[in-house]
Image (tube, rainbow, N blue to C red):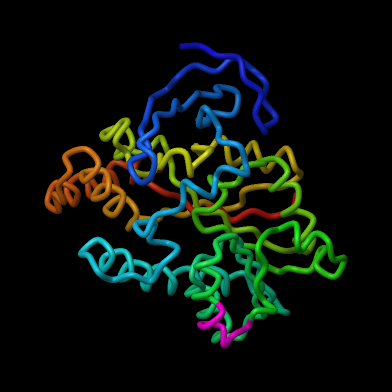
Amino acid sequence: MTVKTVHNSPSLNTFETYVSCEDCLVSGEKFDLLLDDQLDMLVTSPKPATEDLGKYYDSNAYISHTDSKKSALDFIYQTVKKKAIKRKLKLINSFGSKEKRILDIGAGTGDFLKACALDGWDVIAVEPNDSARQFMEIKLNNGAGFLHKSMSNLLEEDRFFSSFDVITLWHVLEHMPNLDETIFNLKKLLKPEGTIVVAVPNYKSFDAAYYKNFWAAYDVPRHLWHFSQTAIRRLFFFQGMEVVKTLPMKYDSFYVSLLSEKQKTNKMNFLRAFWIGLRSNWKAIKSKEYSSLTYTIKNT
């Protein structure tokens, strides 16, 4: 299948279907992932209208919007999240920011920002989901003044321009309907010497190749874009920014493989998921194509 499409990226060309996937969480609808060979990324098609995206998150199983520990999968997610937060805090502290002002976009239920606040960071959050924001308000001592529903709220106030030492998007960029506009606005909000941290799945990883259309990190249509390392570098380069460091997220290969096993076989095959996650990390030692990657990005 070859289609002509115009999407929110610097590239306008003919895309071909790379793989077709099903929304296993909410709708059961099928989507194609189209290869943009100029950017080396995949684009979800058809792309839902921005006003319709909310319904695809309307599920109690969408764990990043809850603090659930009801199932074994929930428990694993929450356990890994605690370890990941320590790593994230260590990373942002390594930048040596003097004023320690951070904006976390797609902040979920606020555990990362709570850790930042306890560590002396001045925190601002953007989270569109109402339920997740309610969890966050409690964790930040009813700090509703720190919470915003969208980036547009920040862009309406001059005081936020060029004001953040660090801006983080932990598995968020792939959800943004207007990709180029989002990156452009990130640059507006960042201090000239500040740092953007972006963590996203990597469709060139071994576990993605192994699970194909069952790879859980495709997560259509909530994930609108599916990045390679080349794509991230080019997208930010077009906006006058540079990837200065790329770090692996080694836990992700195990968790994503477990979700993928469930989608593929309808069973929680822990042993196979562990084996595939382990193989993915092992192969990535040489290829550097880990299941998920964290990019630190600076103004050029």
Q: Position of residue 259 (x, y in %)?
A: 27, 49
State how many labels appear.
0
Q: Position of residue 231 (x, y in %)?
A: 57, 36
Q: Residue at x 52, y 28 (%)?
A: 46
Between 290 and 6, the one lying in front of the other is 6
232 left or right, relative to 254: right
Q: Is residue 134 above or below residue 185?
A: below
182 left or right, relative to 72: right
Q: Residue at x 40, y 39 (%)?
A: 218
Q: Give the quarter of the image for residue 137.
A: bottom right
Q: Position of residue 91 (x, y in %)?
A: 52, 68
Residue 289 seen from this side:
no
Q: Position of residue 199 (x, y in %)?
A: 51, 53
233 left or right, relative to 220: right
283 left or right, relative to 12: left
Q: Residue at x 41, y 67 (%)?
A: 66
Residue 33 seen from this side:
yes
Judge whether residue 204 is colored magenta.
no
Between 203 and 106, the one lying in front of the other is 106
Q: Is residue 296 above or below residue 123?
A: above
Between 40 and 132, the one lying in front of the other is 132
Q: Which residues are magenta?
A: 137-143
Q: Residue at x 54, y 50 (%)?
A: 54
Judge whether residue 140 is colored magenta.
yes
Q: Is residue 259 above or below residue 206?
A: below
| Residue placed furthest toward the right | 158
Q: Quadrant of the N terminus?
A: top left
